[in-house]
Image (cartoon, rainbow, N blue to C red):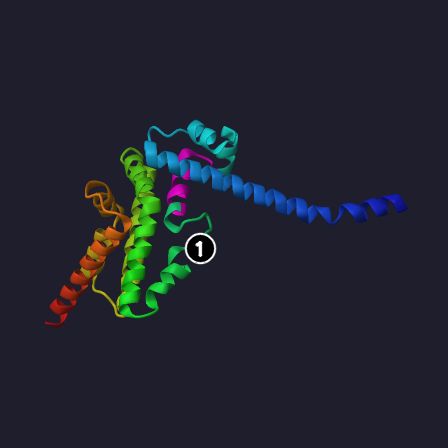
Amino acid sequence: MSSKVAASSVDEPRRPYKSSRRAQQAAQTRHDVLAAATRLYESSGWAKTTINAIAAEAGVAVETVYSGFGSKKALLRAAIDAAVVGDAEPTPLIEREEFLALGKGSKAERIDAAMELQSRIHARSARVWRAVMEASAADDEIESWRLELERGRRIDARRGAELVLGHEVDDVTSDLLWMMFGPEVFLKCTTDLGFTAGEYESFMKEAFMRLTAQRRQTKTG
C-alpha cells in the first residue's frame, strides 16, 4: 500500500504540467494551420487552396486540420477572423486596446492611430477577404456569413469614427466611411496605385478629414 501511495504522490504533480503542455502544443498547431491557410488563401485564392495543401504547408496531417476546424469553409472563417485582429484569440476588435486607443490623445493623434490601425488590419486580411469574396459567389453559407462580417465591419467603422471625432456621426457619413475604408479600396490603393502602407495611410487620412469636415458643414449649414 505504501508503495502505491508513494507512486501516486510522485505522479500527481505531473498531470497539470502534461495537460498544460498538450494545450500549448494544440494552440501552436492551430496557429500553424491558420498561418498556412492564410498564406495559401492569399496567394492561391479559395478554389485552388485545398485542405491537403494547407496540411502540407503547416507540416501536419490532413486529419489534424479536419479535427481542428471541421471543414474548409470553417477554416476560411477562422482565417479571416484571425487576420482581422492579428491572432486567434476570441476578443473582438472593439474591445482591444488598439481600437480603444482611437478615443485617446489629441484629434490629430486619434486620426493617425485610426489610419495606422486600418492599414495594419487590411495588410493582414485584405487578400484573405478576396478569397472570401470568391468563395461566397458559389456558396450560400459563406455568402451569409460574408454579409454578417460586413455588418460587423460597418458597425465597427461607425464606432471607430465616433471615437476619433468625439461625437456621433450620421448614417450617410457612417456608410461612406464603411465603404471608403473597405478592403477593396485598400487593394486598389496598394496594388493598382502602388501605394506603400504610409502612402495609403496619408491618402486615407486626407479623405477622412475632407469627408467628415464636409458632412459636418452640411449638417450645421
Magenta span: 69-82
In the image, farthest residue toward the left: 221
| Magenta-colored stretch includes residue 77 | yes
The total of numbered circles placed on residues is: 1
Q: Which residue is tagged 1?
A: 91
Image quadrant occupied by the N terminus: top right
Q: Is mark 1 on a helix, strand or loop?
A: loop
Residue 101 is situated, as x and y percent measured from the top left of the image, at: 37, 64
Q: Nearer the viewer, residue 105 or 63?
A: 105
Q: Can residue 1 be seen in this view?
A: no
Q: In this view, does 172 lie to the left or right of 8?
A: left
Given residues 125 and 195, the one toward you in this image is 195
Q: Which secondary structure class fits the magenta region best?
A: helix
User: Looking at the picture, how far across and down is residue 99, in whole percent?
Assistant: 36, 60
Camera-side residue of 126 and 65: 126
In the rendered structure, the answer to whether residue 99 lies left or right of residue 171 reads right
The image quarter in which residue 97 lies: bottom left
Q: Residue at x 21, y 46 (%)?
A: 189
Spot the residue most to the bottom.
Answer: 220
Occupied quadrant, residue 170: bottom left
Q: Give x and y (percent) for residue 174.
A: 22, 59
Seen at 32% across and 39% down, the residue is: 132
> Within 10 Å of the Cα at label 1, are there few (<14), some (14-19), or many (20+) other Cα atoms?
few
Examine the structure image and report whether residue 188 is included in the region drawn in magenta: no
**Image position, residue 43 (x, y; %):** 33, 34
Residue type marked 1:
Thr
Q: Going by the picture, which residue comes out furthest to the right?
A: 1
Q: Can residue 142 be seen in this view?
A: yes
Which residue is depicted at the point 10% across and 72% down? 221
* Up-down relation of residue 127 to residue 112 (above or below): above
